[in-house]
Amino acid sequence: LFFHSLLRWGILITVAAAGITALMGMLRNGPVLMWHRSMAIWGMVLCHVQLVIGFALYFMRWDSFAMRPPDQMRYWKFEHMGMMLIAIALVTIGRLASKKAKTDKGKQLRVAIFYLLALLLMLAMIPWPFTAMGEGRGWI
C-alpha cells in the first residue's frame, strides 16, 4: 500500500508534465522533442505498474472489503477502481494514438487531450487525506 501511494506522485507528475508540454508544444507549433515523448512513455509505464500493484492489493485484501461499510466498499470496489481503469486506458490510448498521427501537432494534440483528461480523473478519484475515503491515510 505504501508503494502504491508513493507511486501515485510519480504518475501525477509524469502524466501532468506530458499533457502540459504536449499542449504547449501544440499551441506553439513546436516539434515533438525526445523528452516530451519520453515523459509520455514513462507516464504510461508507471500507470501500468500502478495498475498491477492496485490489482494485487485488491485481491490480497479481498476479505477486508466485506468488513467495510457499504459506501466505502462501493467506493473501493467500483468508483476508485473503475475510474482509475478508465484513466489508465485514456493514457494508453493517447500514447498509441499519438504514435499513429502524421504531424507533430497531431501527436501533441492527442497526448494533450488524453493525458489531461486522465489526469483529471485521477485527481478526482484519489482518496486524498481531506476526503471521506482518505481520512487518516496521510499524503504518502
Image (cartoon, helix red, strand yellow):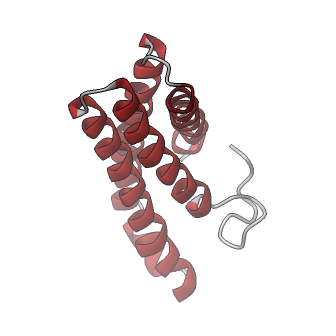
Q: Which residue lies furthest to the top in this view?
A: 34
Closer to the camera in the image, 101 or 48: 101
Quadrant housing the C terminus: top right
The residue that appears at 54% across and 54% down in the rendered structure is 122
Residue 27 image-quadrant placement: top right
Q: Which residue lies furthest to the right in this view?
A: 130
Q: Horizontally, is 93 left or right of 114 in the view? A: left
Rendered position, 92 above or below 132:
above
The residue that appears at 73% across and 68% down in the rendered structure is 131
Residue 20: give x, y in percent of width and height. Answer: 58, 35
Q: Residue furthest bottom?
A: 70
Rendered position, 86 above or below 111:
below
- Visible residue check, residue 61: yes
Rendered position, 49 above or below 29:
below
- Visible residue check, residue 45: no
Count the marks: how many?
A: 0
Closer to the camera in the image, 130 or 27: 27
Closer to the camera in the image, 24 or 132: 24
Q: Horizontally, is 101 left or right of 25 in the view? A: left
Residue 47: give x, y in percent of width and height. Answer: 41, 40
Residue 14: give x, y in percent of width and height. Answer: 53, 31
The residue that appears at 45% across and 13% down in the rendered structure is 33
Q: Which residue lies furthest to the front in this view?
A: 29
The residue that appears at 74% across and 66% down in the rendered structure is 135
Closer to the camera in the image, 69 or 46: 46
Residue 6: give x, y in percent of width and height. Answer: 60, 38
